[in-house]
Amino acid sequence: MACRAAPLRSTLLALTLLGFADACTASTSAPAEASTAPPEAAAPRVLIQGLLFDAPPSGLSSLGVNPATAGFEELVTRAGAHHVCSPTYLATDGVVASMHLPGAAERAASAHDDPLATFRLDVKPHVIEGGRVRLEVDLTLGGKDAKATIDVDDAQSIVLGTDVAVDGRPYVLVLRPNIVRSDADLRAVAMRIAGSRR
């Protein structure tokens, strides 16, 4: 397939996504500075949860759930065999987090028309004022490169439709950023995720 730029169409939805990531290590300062200078604030981190799947041709509502209120695990279950992956990143503010599917080389060698053979997802989060996150998304799928920059509230999900489809089922990418300013924030996110699974 020829590579070409394709804009992502975005719609904000209040989905609840589930995932988990381990805490990062805290920064330290030199002993001489510790007694005279306040510790530097660590750069905020963003726990990015996601889901890639190919949706029914008639739209997400035909999955049998309301996408605005469905939980992440319920959405994965409804997507069934069409659920491709659910990446979870713990990214530092301003740093690109990148994901490839395992076995991409084997896919490329065995099926030239497999859209997942070229799959790559790069997300660069920026924490901005008002408890919002700017996501720079670069998705390569089916030989097409789709880029988008989206501002979204902390812990709010965004659904990105693509123009890549298999058997009439368009691929959909769901992302949810969670601002993490401390390890306590990360523990709170993990507890919220664990509670939603009960």
Image (cartoon, grey):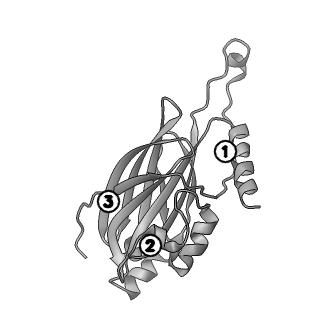
Q: Secondary structure at mark 3?
A: strand
The residue singled out by tag 1 in the image is: 24
Query: What's the CA distance linking mark 1 and mark 3?
Result: 30 Å
User: Residue 94, how many percent across, how many down?
Assistant: 46, 40
The quarter of the image holding the N terminus is bottom left
Dot 1 or dot 2: first in sequence order is 1
Q: Nearer the viewer, residue 107 or 32?
A: 107
The quarter of the image holding the C terminus is bottom right
User: Residue 39, how many percent across, how many down?
Assistant: 67, 22
Res 19 → quadrant: bottom right
Res 162 → quadrant: bottom left
Q: Amino acid at mark 1?
A: Cys
Residue 17 appears left or right of 8: right
Mark 2 nearby-residue class (10 Å; few <14, some 14–19, many ≥20): many
The residue singled out by tag 2 in the image is: 55
Q: Nearer the viewer, residue 141 or 41?
A: 141
Q: Secondary structure at mark 2?
A: loop
Dot 3 or dot 2: first in sequence order is 2
**Are dots 3 and 2 in contact, CB under 8 Å?**
no
**Are dots 1 and 2 in contact, CB under 8 Å?**
no
Q: Residue at x 43, y 66 (%)?
A: 172
Q: Nearer the viewer, residue 60 or 90?
A: 60
Q: Secondary structure at mark 1?
A: loop
Q: Residue at x 33, y 71 (%)?
A: 164
Residue 36 appears left or right of 178: right
Q: Nearer the viewer, residue 162 or 118?
A: 162
Q: Tell which residue pokes out farthest to the top in this image.
A: 36
Query: What's the CA distance linking mark 1 and mark 2?
Result: 34 Å
The residue singled out by tag 3 in the image is: 146
Mark 3 nearby-residue class (10 Å; few <14, some 14–19, many ≥20): some
